[in-house]
Image: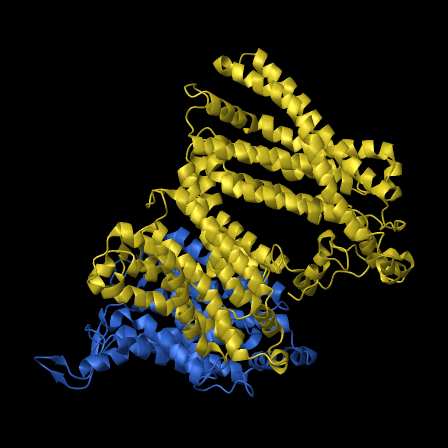
Amino acid sequence: MATLMSGTLLPPARETRLLVIKWVIALLVPLLVFTFVWNGEAAINQIIVGLFIHNSTLGSRYDWTTLIGATIFFVLFYGLLTALAGYAVAADSGRQNPIMLWISMVVFTVVPIVLISIVNDLFVGISFSVLVWVPYFLILRFWHRSRPAVASALPRLTPLNSEEQASLVRRAIAGGFWFGLTFAVLSLVVDLIYFFSGQYGTDSGILLIWIVLRTVLLPLAGYFLGRLSGGLALRHTLKANGKKAQSSKEAIDPRLNPSLLTGLSASRSREEARDLVPNDAPLNSSGARNFYLVLLFAFLLCYPMIDPLLFGPGTEGRLSLYGDAGRYVILALGLNIVVGFAGLLDLGYVAFFVFGAYTWALVGSPQLTVLTGLVSDPHIWSWLFWPMVLVAALIAALWGVLLGAPTLRLRGDYLAIVTLGFGEIIPIIAQNMDKYTGGTNGLSGIYSPAFFGVQWNVSTPMPYYYLMLFLVALVLFANVRLRDSRLGRSWIAIREDEIAAASSGINLVKTKLFAFGAGAFFSGIAGAYFAAKLSTVASSNFSFTDSVLYLSMVVLGGLGSIPGVVVGALAVYAINVLVLAGLDNIGSDPASFLHPGYAQLQALFPNFSFGNIRNLIFGIILILIMIYRPEGLIPSARRRRELHHQAKEDEEVEVGALDATPGSAEFEKEVRVE
Amino acid sequence: MSLFLGLLAAGLAIGSIYALVSLGYTMVYGIIELINFAHGDIFMIGSLVVLGMLINVFHVTEASHLSGLPLIVVLVVTCVVAMLICAVLGVVIERFAYRPLRNAPRLAPLISAIGVSLILEDIGKFIIGPANASAPDVLPRIHYCIGPTDPNQGCLGMDITNIQILVIVVAVILMVALQWLVTSTRIGRAMRAVAQDREAAALMGVNVDRIIAITFLIGGALAGAGAFIFMLSVGVTIFNIGFELGLFAFTAAVLGGIGNLVGAMLGGMVIGLIRALVTYIPDKDIPFGLPHGGVAWQDAIVFVVLILILLFRPTGLLGQRLSEKV
């Protein structure tokens, strides 16, 4: 193991073997837990049987689309993990201790899988595992700080020649191949045990064919996937170390000149060195992130199809809930523009949501007949949903500008109160003008959207889930482009210092109004979706509590950081809606492990349930996060440094703070003004 | 005319309650520049305390017919206990939710205040459930008439009840006491100093932490007293009464000039009057009335007033924020 710490770039063959062992074990253990402890194996068996045998007991309850979608997902899943194994072996510099890696993998992947399988509820399982992760993370950080900082020798940095490049790819191939082979052998053993104990019953013929096929194909797939990921790792390493052909770069490029690095402070030079060699933590690297993103994308797209296989019945209800989460994501992203980018504290954001919802409600429902006398045929009128989303968004944006105009001269707290006032007035108007809006009972019978060949009404959550995915993708794309645009940068400038921004030629009025308008635009989109999905809107759906909820999503996630806001929205939604309801379900289920404690609590406090104390828990979480982590869950790097500036100079810089090599594209992204 | 005067009396009564609560808001804002969203919920907890005292401790019911010394004892003890508990609650909230965030950027204590508000509302919901809870009538309702009386039409002047008079009198006494405290005592001087310039006050030997705690204490006590007279006059409470009432009280504080005590009192009265007079608007369509009548639009009108004030006179009626704070 000591030779692993030498820090040279391309260790000889023995090191390769050790690296392969390290990564194969690290990635194989969670995969085996998922496949054999949880439902992975059962799911695949059901898919195979369902695809080929139609009247068996095992697989016949799922239809074609479910099976094909699940097949695609599982192929991608196992393939990506194999490729990741190859990538990690190639990208690893060998400095990280394998034991630490294995412990981290167990804590971060095995623990949630086990917990989810125990409680059989995705979000309750994740929240329990968060309870495990937080102390682990704190212990790890404490331990890192208590150890004396060892200044490791900087490696010799030279561009890679073709032999070194080839050996890099060979490492990746070795990693992928051995991963595939080991997994195939192990699952062969387990399946033979199942087979000979007769668990497969009448379907065993087809499953035997599948087992043999798998044992042959997996190592082959490992070889090719390893080759692919080796190419990817090679590209990243070349970007980090410079290509040989460009000799002029050698003189100027400080990364290739170690003596320049010695002029920096000790922590900074450690940071630079770590960035320059293939990663100390390959799983955090940008190359690995590509794998995660593809996996996440496949997971989201295929989720309706794998959910019945993983969690059993009740898919429709779960899909409906998760689709709702997307609405909160869109709202949080819109509020992020106003509060996060432009720094205008908006406490009445729900007003724009109301506009969006009522726009589609007034046009796409029998209320239109009441108001204007036009008779609308539901089948044709439903197609109007798609342009009306845009119209609703534009109307909401218009009102955003109108309601934002009075606030332009106000600062901070007064702005908050005025927006709060608007957020209260608009629902009251909606409630009282019941000739148009239906008052407290609201409008019902709102049409769902129409699409080719899709049966779409209020009780089919799956089309709404895909619609929500599409809308979230659109809104995310728009937000990222807005943030990187000139307008986005002027918002950030206004947030940081208004006077300086005005002195730099930014038109304050126009930019602030644009911020309100853009933020309201996205809430209009969410409003139209909400009206269509719920098929009714009533003024009691909107209140200040919702505004507070959206604001807390943005603040908890990290003001101004788009991934942070998405995660914050999902976390707040999970806490508020999913986790507590899930805990209630588990607690009242007599067979679960929570039941005794739950029953006792209910005996003590007569009307106790987790749903009832939702606000209590949420308030406590808000206060704790404001005291201990005010920058949010995924803050932008700038804000983290701003809020924790007491962090000592000689301390280890956080791994996540500067992950990209200086001068590369990702580095520019890291230090952008945000 | 008598209807109008009657509404005037009712408006002054409810306005006094708003004034008491808004004093808490304005003092806290003047001293640490924080909108204390939880203050309205301290009021709500105070009303729960009054409810508990009347029903569980003194066992007052409709048929009790207290009078004389027992009545005075019940009222005074209830009021004092409510004020004490709310004062302590205010100090505890400041100590745990606001003091760690003293130096954080503006958004953090605001979110923390919202968190405290959520917690208190849930505790209230836990104690009395989600529905209204009403207090028994302790004082008999006696109507007085200021002005001529007509045997056929009743009172032609101002029709005021003894409870309304009591409310206004208690509120005025407390406000005068607070004004005396702030202007004529050492603690009051220290409070004004901390509001003006925290660091300079610390340099002059003022214990800033203690003064801020005392501010929250006084604000809480006033909210408790407001809750007491609220339960006497209106008599009905619900777990989320704190939020809206707090908002109106903050509007009152802004109306009078934030940081200005007399302004808060004045603003409270004005907001109460506006709310009462708006109910006069008939239930007709837009040009001549409002749909569902003025009663349904009371809240919206108050917010419109707030927005107009902030647009056209952001320093409030009496405020000169830059030169003098309290």
- Name above or below for residue A638 compared with residue A508: above
Q: Is residue A134 left or right of residue B164?
A: right
At horizontal 57% and vertical 14% (from top left) the residue drawn is A195
Q: Is residue B225 left or right of residue B197?
A: left
At horizontal 23% and vertical 75% (from top left) the residue drawn is B286
Q: Is residue A673 left or right of residue A198?
A: right
Q: Residue furthest right?
A: A259
- Name above or below for residue B40 compared with residue A242: below
Where is residue A407? Give x, y as percent: 47, 77
Report which quarter residue B4 is drawn in. bottom left
Q: Which chain is yellow?
A: A
Where is residue A625? Give x, y as percent: 59, 56
Where is residue B98? Give x, y as percent: 57, 65
Q: Is residue B165 visible?
A: no
Rendered colour, chain B: blue
Which of the pair A75/A563 is nearer the observer? A75
Report which quarter residue B72 is drawn in. bottom left
Where is residue A472? Give x, y as percent: 49, 53
Q: Is residue A22 visible?
A: yes
